Amino acid sequence: MLPADALQTGAVPADAVRREAVAADARASVSSRAHGANGAAAGGRPSGRRDRHGLEMSGLGSGAAGDAAATWYESAVDSLLFFRGDVAESVAELRRLAPGAPLGQVFAAYLGLLGTEQSQAAAARQEFARFRAAADDGARTAREQAHLTAAAAWLDGNIARAGAVLREIAVAWPRDALALVVGHQIDFFTGNAAALRDRIAGALTAWDEEDPHHGPLLGMLGFGLEESGHYARAEETARAAVERHPGDVWGIHAVVHTLEMQGRFAEGIRFLDARRPEWGAGNMMAVHNWWHYALYALEAGDTRRVLEVYDAALDPAVTSGLALELLDASSLLWRFHLGGDDDRAAVGDRWAPLADAWAARGDGPHYAFNDTHAVMAYLGAGRVREAEALLADRKEWATHSHPGVTNHAMTAEIGLPVCRALLAFTQERYEDAVDLLFPLRGRFATFGGSHAQRDAVQRTLLEAALRARRLDLARALLSERLALRPTSPYNWLGQARLADAVGRSALAATARERAAALAAPGRSSTQDVGPAAAEGAVPGGEVAR
């Protein structure tokens, strides 16, 4: 698990101790094997083949077949960096031509894990075990052995160790694009903003700026800078990535996050509209970037537009039903659930199919962040028993020891209390929801996601505080939000409700006027697009959010 705030002043967080142990283990894993600058074979048998960045690869074979295998590896890395859906096909061809190549096997393992899909992870674990049982350890390079260590750790549930080993690979071989992009996603899944920034920043000076893969690194760095609060630098960096590669959907995603966190939603709508052919369909980020578009429209108060986007791009009827798609749908509808009667009525019957899609998956304890969004769907659909059943299952699982399984701490420390709070909110036990969420509000990041994604939980706390008439707390929460995003209509509408609650009607009216004035440019932007704006938005399956 990632480091969390100390519960008592002066205390050393237990998670910080675990993080240091993981890092030390990873350093030992890499440094215990002699290697040269390009990753010479650990067993002293270099293969003679190198990737486009000069890093040695073993097991590809010789002649035309070896050349073809190397080409498929390059294709797979390129597709992963640009979130193209053909990455799995490229890896399959690599493994077919060179079944003994370690990088082909670890790549397949990573793909089985990056979707946070329990069934895919289980299948990848079996395939990886078969390879390890038959493989020739002596023919691997030190870099490849470190990748094998990282993949094995993640397949065993130790996401933290996998991320740390990949970080050590990036230190020793900073031009290992596979290690960088997979490590970056691990930092995302574990909510580690500092690592999300520093993993890429630490490798960047080793790269030639003219390298075609330098652009995607800028997109990753931009996202890490945004999650770390460096908004001006994040926007500059992410826009540079998009300028270099207009189809860099992760770079687009980084710009979108930066605008979101600054409350520049009207500008965000225009940014996405101008680039819809590049991101709107045909890539593994399309569903998630449409979710961002819907958040902008929601901030502008354009409910009609939000639900158009939901129906065209997020509804489980038009997606593949992967967890990373369903959680975007849950997160969006939950924001309506937190609203008043009109907001809830606007959702109509959309909750039921979403809850059905979560139930059909039959997930066990795999990733607490997914569990939270499944509970949102069950509660939104009025299926409280299913939410309670999931909670009971995870509670029982969490009572047992699961050494090295990162999701255990995620579930026990954050996932379960958050799910209980969602249940309490839905049952109108607002005091209980506040009591569950407020002590954890500085630690939500440790069960994954981005600031924008976790805002659904932060909003739940605020709404519960207002409804429980914990007005001092509500005032503090709104004051924090307004300090960060003074241009957010949602924040000003919350301020108006608070003013109403304390009998300051004039202040409430002023806050509502401010909210309406701020929302107007965003409503104008979405109306310019027209009702068919989401047409053609249906994407393929996602690998990462």
Image: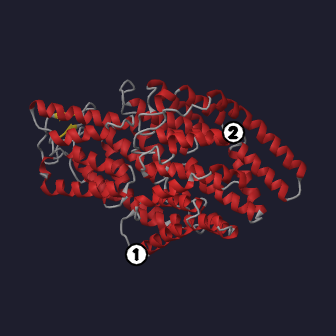
Q: How many neighbours does mark 2 have within 10 angstroms: few (below 14), some (14-19), or many (20 or more)?
A: many
Q: What residue type is labelled 2?
A: Ala
Query: Could you give the CA–CA distance between mark 2 and mark 1, rounded to whole angstroms?
Result: 46 Å
User: Can residue 153 be seen by looking at this rendering?
Assistant: yes
Q: Residue at x 66, y 54 (%)?
A: 344
Q: Which residue lies furthest to the left in this view?
A: 63
* Vertical position of residue 4 compared to residue 388: above or below: above
Q: Is mark 1 on a helix, strand or loop?
A: loop
Tell me which numbered mark, 2 or 1, is placed earlier along the sequence. 2
Rendering coords of residue 477 (x, y %):
71, 56
Q: Which amino acid does label 1 sit on?
A: His
Q: Which mark is residue 300?
A: 2
Q: Which residue is drawn at 73% across and 53% down?
A: 478
Rendering coords of residue 454 (x, y %):
57, 53
Disc 2 and disc 1 in contact, CB within 8 angstroms: no
Residue where numbered disc 1 is placed: 400
Side (left or right) of 26 relative to 221: left
Q: Nearer the viewer, residue 205 or 236?
A: 236
